[in-house]
Image: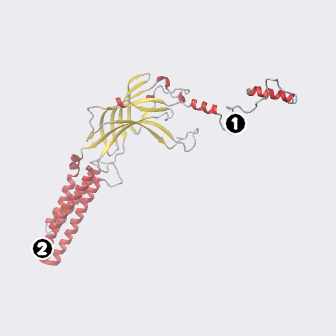
Amino acid sequence: MRVSRTSQTACASVLLAIGGFAELDAGVTSVDISPLPNACSPETKLCPVSSVAAAELADPPVEVAVGIFLNSISQIDLPANKFAFDAYVWFRWDPSAWPPPSARAQAGAPSSPAETFEIVDAVDVSQKVLFERPGYCCLQLKGERLSFWDVRDYPFDRQTLQIVVEDASFDGRAVQYVPDSPNSGVSPSLSVPGAMHGASSVREADFTYPTNFGDPDLSTGSQSAYSRLVFEVPVARDGIGVFFKLFTALFVSAGIAMLALFINATQVDPRFGLCVGGLFGIVASGYAVNSVLPDSAGLRYADMLHVAALVCVLLVVIESAFSLSLHLNRGEAGALLAKRLDRLAFFLLLGGFGLTVFVLTLQRCW
């Protein structure tokens, strides 16, 4: 018969007191003093009961439904890498579950998730509370957000405008955002300056900061994960219209430089003067294009077009110098050869430059 550990200890003490040789009552033949099955053995670090208790103490994060409705995009500032927006943002949650358990004992704990959120990479955002009641809050946000544009294919580029909401006070273990997809979207009257927009989307994404923010309660090298709501609107520019507005001056300047090949090589001033004029026109076009784009270390589509035009001007100058040499050193035969060479060079350069522009543009359009 198995008895409790307290009874086992008491019986053993009595047996030792009388010498351990007396027989127990006839109904009891032996005493089992082996460890109980649920007892902690020396080999285990934690008791099974303790593990269960620890699991029960781990509270799930508070789920907060978040939605966004975009009213307008008033400006897309490419050089400054930002855009201006006007949007509604709302939060829904279980009032009995807020605030998260980790903050309930703190004085001045936030009364709603609307007090702890932030717009990631916001430059200047103003908030206006429209509706508020237990478990629900709706705000209107107006401001600007940073967005680092990929303009390698400008003006045939495609961008994604993002509004990112993150809880600034509680990490993903305490608060988890849930996208309110059915109620999120964009205004039917939404118009993006200089571009066309596609269908919006909303999703939840955890973002991990590779730091413990200096918290002494966390070990060095710890990471902090926060729940985010990401609202996205894809936009595509009207590339053809912008293409002609930006690069017409470039093409005219390159064409003026190539027309110098129809001038007699001995007329040095007008022939080389047209090349210099075309060169200045191309450089001015490059400055104009760069003024509407952010700084970039790589070679963009617009840069490639200007480089191709500069190469054309350089080849015109080289060919003009060679034609002048033929005129001066080979008499009439050299003059006739130089004239034929000028015409051939013009059509080769015009065709080569046009083909380069066509191939580069086709790659971006498709």
Q: Few, some or many C-alpha atoms within 10 Å of disc 2 (few <14, some 14-19, many ≥20)?
A: some
Which color scheme did the rendering employ for the protein?
secondary structure
**Residue 247 pos. (x, y %):** 22, 52
Q: Quadrant of the N terminus?
A: top right
Residue that label 2 marks = 336
Residue 82 versus residue 171: which sits nearer the camera?
171
Q: Is residue 323 above or below residue 253?
A: below
**Amino acid type of disc 2?**
Leu
Q: Residue at x 48, y 41 (%)?
A: 208
Q: Residue at x 57, y 32 (%)?
A: 55
* Residue 107 figure quarter: top right
Mark 2 and mark 1 lie on one chain; the one further toward the N terminus is: 1
Which disc number belongs to residue 41?
A: 1
180 displayed left or right of 98: left
When asked about the image quadrant of residue 274, the answer is bottom left
Q: Residue at x 16, y 68 (%)?
A: 342
